[in-house]
Image (cartoon, rainbow, N blue to C red):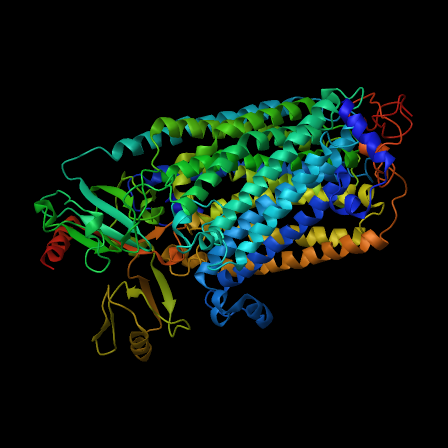
């Protein structure tokens, strides 16, 4: 504590210069904004990759109609304007990687976590501001390395965002020269992942310590906003689940660069030639290590979203969240359980009955806290006085959309029904409902909600509503047909969308529906981008420091909050959502005010 | 016939109905929950909109009905788990190692981007294979025909899996290179092929290819706007002179269609020539999308005939 206080005084003594203030800033708010803007840019870029893929899926083998883009991508990637299969696989792998590791997690944890955690717990900054700064810059380097992979010989990684060995080990291995082996897509992917994981570890340690150590006086555990609980559980998941993947990433790097064979069994024959490796490795080891991270990762994607939705719903129903304690306990339980379900991604790798029964059972168990959380959020609406603001529209839409995502996890979590649905479009539909109209809608709700605090101006409401309604319709047009294709048995990751398969014939035309919906969804995001930049300069000014009449501590700061956040050290007197308290004059009673007013 | 209502592929296997039944029941649960929640949700946001309810109620819902509802959902999940899913898996694992006198064994050796199908031949024993003998043109699985007497009568086909109907089949699934996934949609079989591992998977076909084709029958109107390929007629069609234009089971090409139209026949029943396929379900490289094989299900006697023909070649 004393070190922190000293550090803080130090900052006040010298007003930081441009570089310290805007580039290598240690202020959690600016780091949060850096994370947010970078992550949004990556999200849009990742979305562009898939919009390109969707052309090939809707019109397989036809030249892409925008000549300028074909020219930009070059003959190797788009021979005659028609996408090459290798390039399709690169786009697929990089879309997944960018959306998850460079987009959603940095936005949910890096941006919202950084910006809001110190504000909501009443701290002047993160516990370790310099660690925080390095977290962003390590992330930035990771992103540059990932994107750089598109420009190396053979192009970016092309073995899926899951990078299953041995495909990932043997694809574009590079030449005899060491440097040529480093400058390959998959190696760059692995190096990028090492940076991104390191960044996440630095960030999550920081969030944990900040929440545990820097809470304002009176801010007891059960008075924490649900968003803080969600960030706390998320950070524990990151700290505990990411190291195995970092280890696995380094092991695969060894395989690719130094001739080890952690993931390569003996006796592989590639294109008629025996693969010259020492052998003795296990292809399944990679899957275990990968999914040991990647399943908790699902909850890393969803918990901060649930936290944001909780905040927005409480504020816009003007009443406390229903079942606050059950929400908190369910989130903690969800966190624990997320470590023992990973092998449900591997039901078809030749499992025995016992292991299979274990992972099916844990998967069914984990559905219970998810249902508890969703139920509590829906019941929170009952008795409210609901304001349909733009953030509330996104938060409300999140509920049924996440519901679809969660429910469609059931037939995949039961191993028997998974036999047919595994690795089909049903899976793609399922996890996109969780993450796109689920998490991303929640993150949009958060952006519209906290934008006035960060910028002092509100996002335009009309443009916000256009963004919302078009996105909602288009996004269902993208993902709903995937369930139909999946039921029919259409495999994922097919370069031609399944054109040659008999069982796909009746559902092929849906590829066009999905693609056109995706492009419409892209257009809707342009509305958001325009709104975002226009509102920063010319948006309607926030009426006061607390324009939504909210109760939590971030609204007790000046707008935008200055360095050090609070004009006086806040003290907390009550729970986070004291809206519409009987007998109170106003319908909200902020946490930091000694008496009801 | 659950599959028809759910938009699943034809189910032509003995065990498939278990999988389809579970898919059905889970979806019933999902739809009931979603519609129930959805109606409550819509009613709530309508009833408690600010215009209708300017003052919020601090306490909100006071009953604990939702806890019971959650318990019921959990119980249904347990029922599906213990009632169908776990017992089925146990059956599946056992079936893959259970011999019956007429069990047919076949090895599936996947590779980028084809399915090598290895039959043990007359002696019923798979010959030895060695990666040193692999030759992509002449011996894709490296079968030791010179050194191992059991290998002499073995049959190896590429992308052509032939099986007899009503007979337990055990496929030993493996791969030469990367992970693939051996998917027979109409058999409700999907098994990842893992390098270094040989994984048995069992199924019994209940329909022949002809019967599956009948399930997939379609009536098309001539002249067709689309190019006709890969389809066969399901019955004989003759011209006005009584001479056959196309017989049941024979390809309907554009030329045949032209003759039919000339003879005044504008509607014909057709089905796919190969009504069952092998799909690769796991990304295995740039040719993943074209890693397709064909499954043919014979009457038992025809299967023996087919084997004999292959042995001669």
Q: Of B278 and A396, which appears nearest the observer?
A: B278
x then y, percent, for residue B47? 75, 37
Q: Of B253 and A247, which appears nearest the observer?
A: A247
Is residue B145 among what the camera can see? yes
Q: Note whether A306 is above or below A24 in the view shown.
A: above
Q: Quadrant of the N terminus of chain A?
A: top right
Q: Note whether A351 is above or below A539 in the view shown.
A: above
x then y, percent, for residue A398? 65, 41
Left or right: where does residue B179 sit relative to residue A68? Answer: left
Q: Of A394 and A148, which appears nearest the observer?
A: A148
Left or right: where does residue A72 sit relative to residue A85? Answer: right
Residue at image coords 64%, 54%:
A44
Left or right: where does residue A74 sit relative to residue A286? Answer: right
Is residue A323 among what the camera can see? no
x then y, percent, for residue A62? 48, 69
Q: Of A86 and A22, which appears nearest the observer?
A: A22
Q: Quadrant of the C terminus of chain A?
A: top right
x then y, percent, for residue B249? 24, 63
Q: How many marks?
A: 0
Q: Note whether A265 is above or below A147 in the view shown.
A: above
Residue at image coords 56%, 70%:
A71
């Amino acid at each position: 504590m004393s070190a922190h206080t000293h550090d803080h005084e130090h900052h006040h003594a010298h007003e930081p210069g441009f570089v310290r203030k805007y580039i290598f800033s240690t202020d959690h708010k600016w780091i949060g904004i850096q994370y947010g803007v970078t992550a949004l840019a990556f999200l849009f870029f990742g979305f562009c990759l898939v919009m390109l893929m969707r052309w090939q899926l809707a019109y397989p083998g036809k030249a892409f109609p925008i000549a300028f883009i074909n020219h930009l991508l070059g003959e190797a990637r788009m021979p005659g304007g028609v996408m090459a299969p290798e390039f399709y696989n690169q786009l697929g792998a990089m879309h997944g990687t960018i959306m998850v590791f460079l987009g959603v997690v940095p936005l949910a944890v890096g941006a919202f976590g950084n910006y809001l955690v110190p504000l909501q717990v009443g701290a002047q900054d993160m516990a370790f501001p310099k660690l925080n700064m390095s977290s962003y810059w390590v992330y930035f380097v990771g992103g540059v390395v990932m994107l750089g992979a598109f420009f190396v010989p053979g192009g970016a990684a092309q073995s899926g965002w899951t990078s299953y060995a041995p495909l990932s080990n043997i694809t574009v291995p590079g030449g005899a020269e060491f440097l040529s082996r480093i400058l390959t897509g998959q190696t760059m992917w692995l190096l990028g992942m090492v940076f991104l994981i390191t960044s996440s570890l630095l960030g999550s340690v920081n969030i944990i310590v900040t929440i545990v150590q820097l809470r304002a006086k009176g801010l007891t555990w059960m008075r924490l906003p649900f968003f803080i609980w969600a960030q706390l559980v998320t950070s524990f998941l990151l700290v505990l689940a990411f190291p195995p993947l970092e280890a696995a990433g380094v092991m695969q790097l060894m395989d690719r660069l130094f001739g080890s064979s952690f993931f390569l069994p003996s006796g592989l024959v590639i294109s008629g030639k025996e693969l010259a490796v020492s052998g003795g490795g296990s292809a399944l080891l990679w899957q275990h290590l990968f999914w040991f991270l990647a399943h908790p990762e699902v909850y890393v994607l969803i918990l901060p979203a649930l936290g944001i939705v909780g905040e927005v719903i409480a504020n816009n129903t003007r009443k406390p969240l229903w079942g606050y304690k059950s929400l908190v306990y369910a989130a903690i339980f969800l966190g624990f359980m997320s470590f023992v379900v990973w092998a449900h991604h591997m039901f078809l790798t030749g499992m025995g009955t016992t292991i299979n029964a274990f992972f099916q059972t844990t998967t069914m168990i984990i559905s219970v806290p998810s249902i508890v959380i969703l139920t509590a959020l829906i019941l929170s609406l009952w008795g409210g006085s609901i304001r349909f603001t733009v953030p509330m529209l996104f938060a409300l839409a999140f509920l049924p959309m996440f519901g679809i995502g969660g429910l469609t996890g059931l037939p995949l979590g039961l191993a028997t029904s998974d036999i047919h649905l595994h690795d089909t479009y049903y899976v793609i539909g399922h996890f996109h409902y969780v993450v796109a109209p689920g998490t991303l809608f929640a993150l949009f709700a958060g952006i519209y909600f906290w934008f006035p605090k960060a910028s002092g101006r509100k996002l335009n409401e009309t443009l916000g509503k256009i963004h919302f309604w078009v996105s909602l319709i288009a996004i269902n047009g993208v993902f709903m047909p995937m369930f139909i294709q999946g039921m029919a048995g259409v495999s994922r990751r097919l370069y031609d969308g399944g054109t040659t398969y008999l069982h796909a014939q009746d559902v092929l035309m849906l590829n066009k529906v999905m693609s056109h919906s995706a492009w419409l969804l892209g257009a809707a995001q342009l509305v958001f981008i325009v709104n975002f930049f226009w509102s920063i300069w010319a948006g309607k000014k926030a009426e006061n420091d607390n324009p939504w009449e909210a109760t939590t501590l971030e609204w007790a700061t000046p707008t935008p909050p200055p360095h050090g956040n609070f004009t006086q050290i806040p003290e907390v007197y009550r729970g986070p959502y004291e809206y519409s308290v009987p007998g109170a004059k106003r319908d909200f009673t902020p946490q930091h005010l000694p008496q009801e007013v | 016939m659950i599959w028809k209502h759910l938009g699943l592929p034809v189910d032509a296997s003995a065990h498939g109905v278990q999988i389809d039944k579970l898919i059905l029941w889970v979806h019933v649960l999902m739809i009931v929950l979603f519609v129930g929640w959805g109606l409550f949700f819509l009613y709530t946001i309508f009833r408690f909109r600010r215009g209708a309810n300017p003052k919020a109620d601090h306490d909100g819902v006071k009953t604990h009905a939702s806890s019971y509802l959650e318990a019921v959902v959990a119980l249904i999940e347990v029922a599906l788990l213990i009632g169908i899913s776990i017992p089925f898996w146990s059956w599946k694992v056992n079936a893959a190692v259970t011999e019956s006198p007429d069990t047919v064994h076949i090895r599936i050796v996947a590779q980028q981007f084809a399915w090598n199908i290895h039959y043990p031949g007359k002696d019923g024993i798979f010959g030895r294979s060695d990666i040193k003998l692999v030759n992509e043109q002449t011996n894709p699985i490296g079968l030791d025909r010179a050194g191992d007497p059991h290998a002499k009568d073995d049959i190896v086909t590429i992308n052509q899996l032939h099986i007899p109907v009503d007979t337990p089949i055990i496929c030993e699934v493996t791969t030469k290179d990367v992970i693939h996934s051996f998917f027979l949609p109409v058999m409700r079989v999907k098994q990842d092929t893992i390098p270094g591992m040989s994984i048995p998977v069992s199924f019994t076909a209940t329909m022949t290819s002809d019967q599956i084709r009948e399930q997939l029958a379609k009536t098309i109107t001539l002249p067709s706007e689309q190019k006709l390929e890969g389809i066969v007629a399901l019955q004989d069609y003759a011209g006005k002179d009584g001479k056959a234009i196309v017989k049941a089971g024979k390809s309907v090409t554009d030329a045949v269609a032209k003759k039919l139209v000339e003879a005044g026949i504008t509607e014909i029943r057709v089905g796919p020539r190969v009504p069952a396929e092998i799909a690769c379900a796991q990304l295995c490289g740039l040719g993943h999308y074209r890693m397709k094989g064909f499954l043919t299900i014979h009457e038992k006697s025809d299967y023996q005939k087919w084997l004999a023909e292959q042995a001669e070649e």
